Image (tube, rainbow, N blue to C red):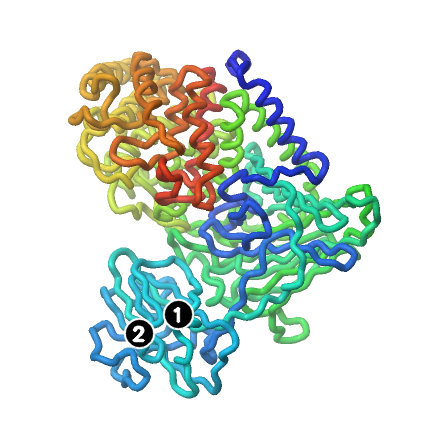
Amino acid sequence: MIATMNFRKKAMHIALWLFASVISVWSAFGQDYNTRKAPAYPLVTHNPNFSIWSTSDVLTDKATEHWTGVAHGLTGYLEVDGQMYRFMGMDAPRYQSVIPEAGNTAKIKVRYSEQAPSKGWNAVAFQASAWKEGPLPISDNKSVSGTFWESDEIWVRREFSLDRVNQQNPLFLKLHHDDNVEVYLNGKLIFEKDGWNNRFEYFDISDKAKGLLQRGKNVLAIALKNTAGGRFLDIDLVNKLPADKGDVAVAQQTGVQVHATQTFYTFACGGVSLQVTFTSPLLMDNLDLLARPVSYISYKAVANDGKQHQVKVHQEVSSDIAVYMADQQEVEGRAYEDGGLSILKVGTVEQPILQKGADDMRIDWGYLYVAAPTGKDVKQYLAGQTAKGKDAPFRGKSLSLHTEISLGTVAATPVQRFLTIGYDEVVAIQYFKQDLRPWWNRDGGRAFESQLQAAVADYTELMQRCTAFDKELLQQANEAGGAEYAHLCALAYRQSIAAHTLVESPAKEVLWLSKENNSGGFINTVDVTYPSSPLYLLYNPVLLEGMLNGIFHFSESGLYPHPWAAHDLGTYPRANGQTYGEPMPVEESGNMLIMTAAIAQAQGNAAYAAKHWDVLTKWTDYLVKEGLDPKTQLCTDDFAGHLARNANLSLKAIMGIASYARLADMLGKQDVAGQYRKIAEEMVPKWMKMADAGDHYALTFDDTNTWSQKYNLVWDKVLDFGLFPKEVATKEIAYYLPRMNRFGLPLDSRKNYTKNDWILWTAVLADDQPTFEKFVDPVYRHALETPSRVPLNDFYDTTNGIRENFKARSVVGGFYMKMLAEKWGR
């Protein structure tokens, strides 16, 4: 099918694009490919906890970040003949608390009242001895709170004394609040804000607070009001300190390219050109490799002026990668050698394994590692620490893990080195009250050093395999959907994978568990699995089984007693049962049936379905009864609210019933197959009549003035059900085209927002390449122009490109629907 597609109009464009891409990555330095390639650039991508990105087109413009937006610093310098050039990251601003002994949060006590206080409560002289006392932070989340708070309002006083007042350094308010806040210093309002933030922010209050600090007693007073959702307060006064390396030159970035498993940067550093490559070898044909949480940073230097230069790489990695809140958690680290490796290791002193579960989370248990082959050219040490003794581990906050690699004399012949960065979660997931180790150590007999040793031993082979895979993916995606489509697929690959964790269930089954990033933090959400499924059907359907296994177990064990499929298994990383507020009966049952049929198509047999036949039958019978004309309920697009008589949800029910019939047929259950195939067939004309709105089909059966993307119809084509007349898809596609906005087709007639995963599913309904590309072009434009600099955002306004919500989600695996359709000859 791919070979017969007509690309005449774009053949030259594609060829040139491929040539430029390959040359920019694998050939000479110094070419200017420095234009924007992505809203955020993947650097180290393994799972929801170990996921580091650059949200700037130039690697030195910002500190590198965890996908949640918190700094997870990777900072690199190239020393050329004694001159330092920063080529990676940015030194994070440094702050020092104004308040004595504020470094250890366990000692920070405040006075608070949940009853409205009397006038003057925010003044220094106010007597608050009758108020309650407790430590910061204040929160309704018991896993992080020092003081538990569940009322609607709270008033807080943080009193402190100063021996002297520093008037030289800028004064900042360090504040993490949820929701509306007013802050007073010695009785004067210095800051107020409606709404909330989800981490510490630093607000310059130098002008407003000028002259307010005094020797002796001072007070920070806070009024906080909860309006919705969670509650949180932590606060400090800090001075901003001068930068340490203000005299270091910034390398000139000359190029950047993003491929499926690798991101490449090139720089000019005086007389030396440098290529830096980030590789996460996420090759899905090998689960042990896929689950090895080790990435590579590779360096290749060459002289660009015909001279010889003495060159060293200085790589700094922040211990903040191993903490939830950097300013609140002490870490412990050490440097050592193991079997030819020089290793730095760091983790929190507390090690609160699996104690926290939420959306906006960073891991604070387990250990971060930086390792490189030993030799005279490699030196490693920790900085920012205090040592307790000669051989004792180093302790502190925000330590820096330094690796210095000497490249020796660099001339016309490139010199290459690499290091590895890895993370041992120790315990990765809790699954129905049982703690599970990461896949690589599922039997509990391995040390993490074994993973570092394997990564170093495999380096040359894996670089070759990743390069070959990236080229092949690029070529196949181009053939399937064009150059812009291929670029979107490359951007989506690591992001989708890195929203999952691989573990083995107690029953020795694969569990490939997603985190619903930035949209609730749920684990193993079925309507997140569903849009992501094409990527895993294409490259390893066992991983899709790993996304369904837990949901099947939840129902089959009796823990979820309903006649429909569950929405999720909990809140990441604890998969102990659904925590989402309500079910999506038609949505999730249809999803599970369709994906099980797709696994059978990919594997050429229905053995997986046979293992779960009873529960599949139960879900199908529910769809037969309730699916054609759904009652008021949510679908996967739950952000749009509840909807009755949803035509697209009805399509899903029909596809689900047809999927069950297909599975029955593959299992030799001909009577069952015929019975349910007939039910699905009889639903089709009913659907067409109820949804008919003249030149299109409506959003709901009761309002012909509405419309929506019928992305669920794609399975009629991809699984070759042949249920719907061709005119249905043709009519819908024709209706969509004039409603396209700058950044894509809206989801439906209610709002301008869209989901780009659904756009690319809808696009597969098109019969010709030019029409397919009309859907892809604005999605590609959004990736390159959106002002929302986050890992691919799938939910955004189609007129301005600004994200409505969501980022770094696995659903972008849905971009691969076109490639899947081509592979299956559809």
Is 501 in front, or is 743?
743
Screen quadrant of the C terminus? top left
Does 818 sit left or right of 73 as displayed? left
Count the labels in the image.
Answer: 2
Query: Going 49% across and 63% down the picture, which residue do you hit?
Result: 326
Up-down relation of residue 190 to residue 453 (above or below)? below
Residue with the mark numbered 1:
235
In the rendered image, residue 803, in percent from the top left (x then y), is placed at 38, 43
In the rendered image, residue 145, in percent from the top left (x then y), is placed at 36, 66
Query: Going 54% across and 64% down the picture, which residue do you hit?
Result: 93
Sequence-wise, the earlier of marks 1 and 2 is 2
Mark linked to residue 589:
none
Where residue 395 sits, quadrant-wise, is: bottom right
Query: Going 44% across and 67% down the picture, which residue do you hit?
Result: 204
In the rendered image, residue 235, in percent from the top left (x then y), is placed at 39, 70
**Does residue 507 appear anywhere in the picture?**
no
Residue with the mark numbered 2:
156
Does 420 sit left or right of 374 as displayed? left
Secondary structure state at the residue bearing disc 1: strand
Is 713 in front, or is 239?
239
Where residue 738 sits, quadrant-wise, is: top left
**Does residue 531 appear anywhere in the picture?**
yes
In the rendered image, residue 274, in percent from the top left (x then y), is placed at 71, 46
Secondary structure state at the residue bearing disc 2: strand
